[in-house]
Amino acid sequence: MKAVITADIVNSRKVAPAIWLTALKQTLNTIGEEYITWELYRGDSIQLLTTPNEALRIAILLKAVIKQIPGLDIRIGIGIGKITYRSEKVTSSNGPAFINSGEAFDGLKKSTLSIKTDWKEIDEVLNIMLDLATLTLDNWKPAMAEVVQKQLEHPDAKQIEIAEMVHKKQSNVSYSLKSAGYDEIMKCVYYYEKEIQKLCLL
């Protein structure tokens, strides 16, 4: 089982590409190698291959990176399933994971984050959870998103350490994480990981 993330940047033409592309590529390079793990196409679209367990955490990380740039957002479809054809380029590969990802992405309307697996029952539960989560994610301010990104990248770091990374007071970091709903969002991530792990063992 693999997970495929299909995403695009909302309002990308309103901001100079160099501003968001640099930040996005820096993060994508920490996840894996270009073309093999991730690929940018059509100027502002992304396809990324990862493990089912990591998919939601990566999706939220990408959200945090893009939400630091005023006026921008990102829409993300996560697909989980098998890969039946693996090319040297992510966008040339195929299989149910890619089909599910494309359908999750194409089905995005009011929400900016959706998931599709081979199990309809869990899809329904997870997508209700994601719809609620995006009510908070979509309203992150740049300062919140910056702190969330650092905390996701350094999950074991204490707030004082995060504060040093972003050159802010610990009280500001604490406020940003609370305002961003970080603890509640991570509960969603842990629930997702637990349920996906069960399904992948079937």
Image (spheres, grey):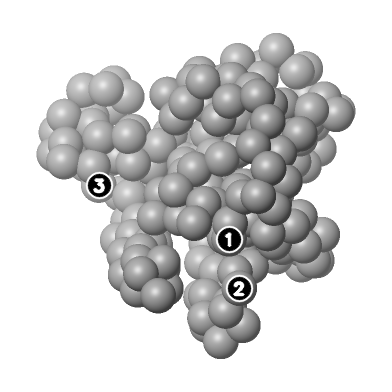
Give how far apart the Cα atoms at labels 3 and 1 are: 37 Å
* Mark 3 and mark 1 residues within 8 Å of each other at the beta carbon: no
Q: Residue 121 carries which label?
A: none
* Residue type highlighted by circle 2: Asp
* Residue type highlighted by circle 1: Gly
Mark closer to the chain start, 3 or 1: 1
> In the image, what residue occupies the spot 68% across and 59% down?
96
* Residue 191 can be seen in this image: no
Nearer to the camera, 172 or 101: 101
Give how far apart the Cα atoms at labels 3 and 2 are: 39 Å
Q: How crowded is mark 1: few (under 14 residues within 10 Å), some or many (20 or more)?
A: many
Q: Mark 3 points at which residue?
A: 174
Q: Residues within 10 Å of mark 3 (few under 14, many from 20)?
A: some
Q: Name the residue under label 2.
A: 118
Nearer to the camera, 14 or 22: 22
Q: Where is residue 184 in the image (x, y as percent from the top left)?
A: 35, 66
Q: In this view, does 178 lie to the left or right of 70?
A: left
Between disc 3 and disc 2, the foreground one is 2
Mark closer to the chain start, 2 or 1: 1
Is label 2 in a helix, a strand or a loop? Answer: loop
> In the image, what residue occupies the spot 49% across and 43% down?
50
* Residue type highlighted by circle 3: Ser
Q: Name the residue under label 1.
A: 81
Quarter of the figure with residue 128: bottom right
* Residue 157 can be seen in this image: yes
* Mark 2 and mark 1 residues within 8 Å of each other at the beta carbon: yes
Q: Position of residue 103 (x, y in %)?
A: 77, 62
Q: Where is residue 46 in the image (x, y as percent from the top left)?
A: 70, 35
- The image shows residue 156, relative to residue 196, as above or below, that is above
Q: Where is residue 146 in the image (x, y as percent from the top left)?
A: 43, 34
Is label 3 in a helix, a strand or a loop? Answer: helix
Between disc 3 and disc 1, the foreground one is 1
